[in-house]
Image (cartoon, helix red, strand yellow):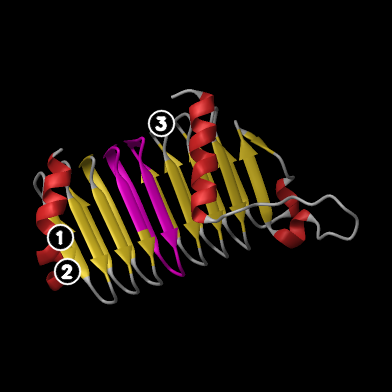
């Protein structure tokens, strides 16, 4: 993956999520410590660490941004990785892989992309948990407070949640899909290959055949 492709991917992701980071230089604008803001690119911190409670760490070819009191973003031990933690005590760790993206948007949210390549984990909400680990092209996405999604130990697994206090788990195989749409639900597609589990069951019965077909392509 070249730098141009990586930049395009990160830029597209930022636009798609509606996340923007502005750095103002005019007089009267809050200083870095008041903003709790840190950026690290290619192993170099752009803001003195002593001036902010946010922490960003990157390695060669990686990019990390942390914004918020106690926010932490790490992108290392790989190349062309991107980590963005936005919110008080939000935590993003992207490592041991190439071309990975981790984004947390919300207080106390956690995002992990570990031991994966070309994988993505997204979390939007308070106390959310999104993980894409140990595989290739893994994807996990959470929208909703207190929810979690994990895609792990395989290739092309997909876990998604839209709703509060719900969870989705896809892994221990390839091309598995777990999705929960609503509050207090649990979807599980593991172990095995080409498994699809969609909750609530009434919705799953309608779209499971279509999803199974897509996963087999």
Seen from the viewer's position, the closer of residues 134 and 119 is 119
Q: Which residue is mark 2?
A: 203
Q: Is residue 175 above or below residue 30?
A: above
Answer with left or right where residue 129 lies relative to residue 49. left
Dominant SS in magenta: strand
Seen from the viewer's position, the closer of residues 56 and 190 is 190
Mark pair 2, 1: CA separation: 7 Å
- Say whether residue 112 is magenta: no
Quadrant in the picture for the C terminus: top left
Which mark, residue 207?
Answer: 1
Query: Do we see residue 206 in this rendering?
Result: yes
Q: Percent x, y for residue 62?
A: 53, 33
Answer with left or right where residue 36 lies relative to residue 85. right
Q: Percent x, y for residue 196?
A: 13, 54
Q: Which residue is mark 3?
A: 98
Answer with left or right where residue 39 lies relative to residue 217. right
CB atoms at circles 3 and 1 under 8 Å apart?
A: no
Q: Percent x, y for residue 4?
A: 53, 26
* Stretch of the chain drawn in magenta: 114-141
Mark pair 3, 1: CA separation: 33 Å
Q: Is residue 144 above or below residue 29?
A: below
Q: Label 3's element?
A: loop
Quadrant in the picture for the N terminus: top left
């Amino acid at each position: 993956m070249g730098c141009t492709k990586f930049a395009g991917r990160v830029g597209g992701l930022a636009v798609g999520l509606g996340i923007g980071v502005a750095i103002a230089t005019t007089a009267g604008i809050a200083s870095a410590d008041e903003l709790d803001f840190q950026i690290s690119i290619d192993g170099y911190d752009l803001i003195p660490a002593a001036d902010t409670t946010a922490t960003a760490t990157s390695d060669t070819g990686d990019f990390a941004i942390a914004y918020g009191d106690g926010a932490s973003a790490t992108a290392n031990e790989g190349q062309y990785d991107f980590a963005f933690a936005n919110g008080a005590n939000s935590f993003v760790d992207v490592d041991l892989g190439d071309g990975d993206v981790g984004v947390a948007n919300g207080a106390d949210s956690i995002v992990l992309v570990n031991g994966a390549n070309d994988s993505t984990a997204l979390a939007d909400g308070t106390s959310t948990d999104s993980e894409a680990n140990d595989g290739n092209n893994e994807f996990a996405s959470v929208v909703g407070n207190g929810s979690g999604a994990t895609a792990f130990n395989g290739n092309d697994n997909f876990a998604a949640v839209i709703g509060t206090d719900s969870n989705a788990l896809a892994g221990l195989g390839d091309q598995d899909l777990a999705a929960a749409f609503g509050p207090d639900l649990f979807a599980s597609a593991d172990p095995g290959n080409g498994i699809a589990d969609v909750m609530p069951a009434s919705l799953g019965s309608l779209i499971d055949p279509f999803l199974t077909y897509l996963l087999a392509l």
